[in-house]
Image: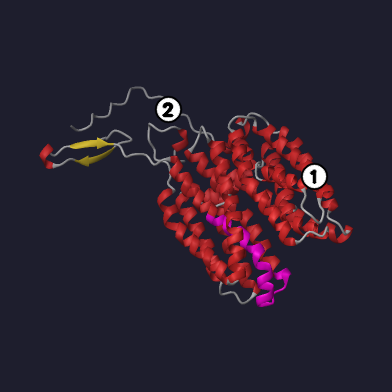
Amino acid sequence: MSWPSGQSWRRVPPSQGEVMRPYRKIPRSPWTVAAGAALAIVTAGAFSTLAGLLVGPLHEDLGWSRASIGLGSLVNMVVYGASAPFAAALMDRLGMRRVAVGALCLVGAGAGLATTMTAPWQFVLYWGVLVGLGTGATATTFAATVTERWFVARRGLVTGLLTAASVVGQFVFLPVLSWVIDTYSWRAAAAALALAAAGALPVVWAAVREPRKDPGRTEDTARPAGRTEGAARHALRTLARAARTGPFWLLAGTFAVCGASTNGVMWTHFAPAAHDHGMPVTVAASLLSLIGIFNVAGTVASGWLTDRADPRRLLAVYYALRGLTLLALPLLLTSAVDAPLVAFTVVFGLLDVATVPPTIALCRAHYGAGAPVVFGWVSAAHQVGAGAVAFAGGMARDTFGSYDPVWVGAGALCAGAALLALTVRRSGQAGRAALTPPVPATPRRSRALPASPPPCR
């Protein structure tokens, strides 16, 4: 016997007769899923800040060279970027909850094992590989997948909120972890993060769900069809298809500039550049924390604007303004913190992560259901740009004796990215068709199918 779709069945008490009556389960709220995803993103984001705080303690406690410590950080950055598209593909196969919980297990295990380190290769393995895999799986691609499956009307806003969650994880934990290291030890800070990941596991497992198939739901709660191919093959196949479209290269190029002008120069070279002008490193770190605070407001506002404006124009404005701030920075750096420098930190903070919601929106417009995996590859370009410019910035400092050419070069890159953003096609039909295999036509039936029997009463 066929049962009506979208209904479950239960047996009523014997006093009412042995009959079967349908009932509908209460659907899980998309905001509950978003809250669980935000917790996972915040927890994983905290691991991104600890590596910078460990350089001095590891050098002093274990006698490691800064180059060997930097190798672990480099491996972490590369693995972080490379794992994002494969994690997005794995979510199509195993579901968001299993991948998110697995990622938290990886970062927790990496931090826990880090407390036992005695050799530099262990830092590369534990922090570079394990933590890199976990943080990459819960990065912005995770946020893109959650919004793709659970939201329609407020996708931009939710994308901004989940992206801001990563920033919150990085900067809320920063002073706490610094205090733990100064008061206790770096091992205590790593152990605290491992415990935080373990504490988040049950909450994320309970909150993060796949949308149920239900005729009453809209497309934001339609679970993607299961895939028969492996996650790695799916990620590589998606890359091959996307690489044949122009929007992919434009989005990857602009997002590579995003990484170059933020992680590559600001988060890597701002503190030493300020120190060159006589500013204490602790003061420069405080300015970076101020940038992080305004990151949250800028990202949420950008998500709200993405729901209402052309994402291409938003990206053009963001990159143009960011380029102007970077060009002005050499004129603002002094030994003291004055009003113009504070204004720079506020404006740069508002623009720092604001490019993420419009970039995800353009990936979604051009590549449809494949957008999370495509954005994973675009995020990999972000990390490549960040790593390349971080290295080039250090070389420029050694060659010219100043960071001024670095800021000017980064500003010029942002100007180019602003122009590239305007060249992205408005319609995404061509790009989406390139990723979506053709669906065979359904043969016409010569006679109508018999109707399903009515439910049992």
Residue 342 has which mark?
A: none
Instruction: For mark 1, give the secondary structure.
Output: helix
Quick one: 272 or 405, which is closer to the camera? 272
Front in this rendered view, residue 390 or 235: 390
Earlier sequence position, callout 1 versus callout 2: 1
Q: Is residue 73 visible?
A: yes
Quadrant assignment for the N terminus: top left
Residue 361's x, y, as percent?
A: 60, 36
Which residue is labeled 2 in the image?
A: 443
Relative side of 330 to 247, left or right: right
Q: Residues within 10 Å of mark 1 (few under 14, many from 20)?
A: many
> According to the image, label 1 marks what residue?
411
What kind of residue is marked 2?
Answer: Pro
Which residues are drawn in magenta?
43-68
* Colouring of the image: secondary structure
Q: Residues within 10 Å of mark 2 (few under 14, many from 20)?
A: few
In the visual, does 129 lie left or right of 257?
left
Quadrant of the image occupied by residue 160? top right
Residues at circles 1 and 2 in contact by the CB criterion of under 8 Å: no
Of badges 1 and 2, nearer the viewer stands: 1
The percent position of residue 143, horizontal first and vertical second, equals 54, 45
